[in-house]
Amino acid sequence: PNAQLTRQDAMVMIKNSLDAAGVSQPAPSATVLSRFPDNGSISSYARSAVSVLVQMGAVNGDDKGMMNPRSYITRAEAAVILHYVMTM
């Protein structure tokens, strides 16, 4: 419980929560991920969750257009994503 959480793992957890709540979502699309230069570093288990959250507008790249999927998510980043999905 004290370990840090990667951005991609946070997205998987949020996507799973949306699934459990029955929230309508777009279909996963590998094409959506191609706009991020580091899309190859997104783990296979997280690709669909990242794709869906990008399409929904809940997640964007950083100011350099990178997704940084294996970086640790900050509290601020998590708050922005959660606020977005809870108010859409």
Image (cartoon, grey):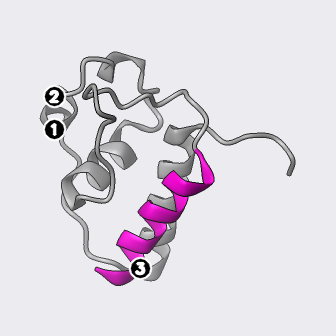
Among numbered discs 2 and 3, the one appearing first in the sequence: 2
Query: Which range is magenta?
Result: 74-88
**Mark 2 lies on residue:** 35
> Label 2 vs label 1: CA separation?
6 Å
Among numbered discs 3 and 1, the one appearing first in the sequence: 1
Q: Residue at x 60, y 37 (%)?
A: 6
Q: Amino acid at mark 3?
A: Met
Q: Residue at x 52, y 64 (%)?
A: 79
Q: Position of residue 41 (x, y in %)?
A: 42, 18
> Label 2 vs label 3: CA separation?
26 Å
Q: Nearer the viewer, residue 59 or 76?
A: 76
Q: Mark 2 Cα within 10 Å, few/some/many (few <14, many 20+)?
A: few
Mark 3 lies on a secondary structure that is helix
**Mark 1 lies on residue:** 32
Q: Are marks 2 and 3 in contact (CB under 8 Å)?
A: no
Q: Are marks 2 and 1 in contact (CB under 8 Å)?
A: yes
Q: Would you say residue 87 sits in the magenta stretch?
A: yes
Q: Position of residue 46 (x, y in %)?
A: 45, 38
**Mark 3 lies on residue:** 86
Q: Amino acid at mark 1?
A: Val
